[in-house]
């Protein structure tokens, strides 16, 4: 999701989202989001672009979920 201003952030909808990651070039905007959504995490781009980073993160979450399900089935 992309927003230009924290006032347009759908805070009520995001409060129940487990993983909220924010990326802003201005640290003041990131701090404002952290105040609104304390469970959010500020990221630095470690991939060639943000889209790639989000895709990689999605794959990591899917792998964790699959591994947890596999471990549950072994019990």
Image: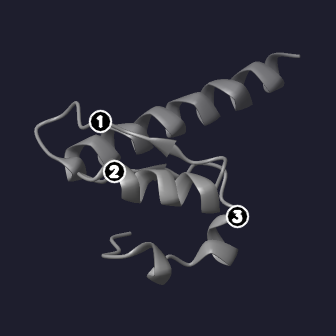
Q: Quadrant of residue 37?
A: bottom right
In terms of sequence position, does the residue under pointer 2 or pointer 3 come before the other? 3
In terms of sequence position, does the residue under pointer 3 or pointer 1 come before the other? 3
Alpha-carbon distance for marks 2 and 1?
7 Å
In terms of sequence position, does the residue under pointer 2 or pointer 1 come before the other? 2
Label 2 residue SS: loop
Q: Quadrant of residue 44?
A: top left
How far across and how far down the image is residue 29, in percent? 39, 59
Front in this rendered view, residue 64 or 18: 18
Alpha-carbon distance for marks 2 and 3?
17 Å
Residue contact between numbered discs 2 and 1, judged by CB atoms under 8 Å: yes
The residue lying at 34 percent from left, 50 percent from top is 23
Please tell me how many numbered marks the rendered image carries.
3
Which residue is tagged 1? 44
How far across and how far down the image is residue 38, in percent? 66, 50
The residue lying at 82 percent from left, 25 percent from top is 72
Which residue is tagged 3? 15
**Quadrant location of the N terminus in the rendered image:** bottom left
Which residue is tagged 2? 23
């Amino acid at each position: 999701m992309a927003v230009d201003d924290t006032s347009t952030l759908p805070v009520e909808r995001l409060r129940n989202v487990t993983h909220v990651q924010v990326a802003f070039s201005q640290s003041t905007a990131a701090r404002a989001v952290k105040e609104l959504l304390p469970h959010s995490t500020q990221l630095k781009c470690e991939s060639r672009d943000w889209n790639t980073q989000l895709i990689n993160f999605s794959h990591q979450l899917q792998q964790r979920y699959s591994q947890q399900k596999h471990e549950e089935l072994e019990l």
